[in-house]
Image (spheres, rainbow, N blue to C red):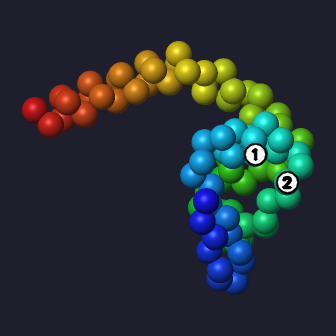
């Protein structure tokens, strides 16, 4: 974990166990309001809050299942090998 001190204090978490806690207890933590320009550039699940976040997280959750990610990773590895040869 690291802390960045600027106009806004930010905490970057790299510990997988802490990330898991944050993902499962998302309602207990308040996210900071994004910069309006950043909100235009980065949309989707990252910028949603509360009920809208929960609704869209439920929609994409099956795609984040490990078995699906293995297929995606394998496909990307094959594409990378094809482009490098």
In which quadrant will I find the N terminus? Answer: bottom right
For disc 2, the neighbor class at 10 Å (few under 14, some 14 to 19, many from 20) is few
Callout 2–callout 1 Cβ contact below 8 Å: yes
In the image as oriented, which residue stretches furthest toward the left? 85
Q: Position of residue 59 (x, y in %)?
A: 73, 27
Question: CA gap, disc 2 to disc 1?
Answer: 8 Å
Mark 1 burial class by Cα count in 10 Å: few <14, some 14-19, many 20+? some
Q: Nearer the viewer, residue 67 or 1?
A: 1
- Residue under label 1, please give it: 22
Secondary structure state at the residue bearing disc 1: helix
Residue with the most extreme bottom position:
7
The answer to which image quadrant residue 8 occupies is: bottom right
**Residue in view at x 67 percent, y 65 percent:** 11
Q: Is residue 38 visible?
A: no
If you read the primary sequence from the N terminus, does the residue marked by circle 2 or circle 1 appear first? 1
The answer to whether 76 is drawn above or below residue 15 in the figure is: above
Side (left or right) of 24 relative to 38: right
Question: Residue at image x 69%, y 46%?
Answer: 18
Work out whether 29 lies above or below 11.
above
Residue 71 x/y as whole percent = 43, 18
Q: Position of residue 76 (x, y in %)?
A: 34, 29
Q: Is residue 14 left or right of residue 30?
A: left
Rendered view: 8 above or below 60: below
Does residue 15 appear anywhere in the picture? yes
Q: Position of residue 79 (x, y in %)?
A: 27, 29
Q: Please, what secondary structure does the residue beneath circle 2 have?
A: loop
Say left or right for 67 vs 13: left
The residue located at (69%, 39%) in the rendering is 20
Quickly name the residue at label 2: 29
């Amino acid at each position: 974990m690291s802390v960045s001190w600027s106009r806004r204090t930010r905490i970057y978490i790299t510990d997988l166990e802490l990330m898991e806690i944050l993902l499962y207890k998302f309602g207990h933590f308040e996210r900071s309001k994004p910069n309006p320009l950043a909100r235009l550039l980065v949309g989707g699940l990252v910028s949603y809050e509360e009920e809208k976040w929960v609704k869209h997280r439920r929609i994409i959750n099956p795609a984040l299942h490990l078995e699906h990610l293995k297929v995606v990773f394998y496909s990307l590895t094959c594409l990378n090998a094809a482009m490098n040869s």
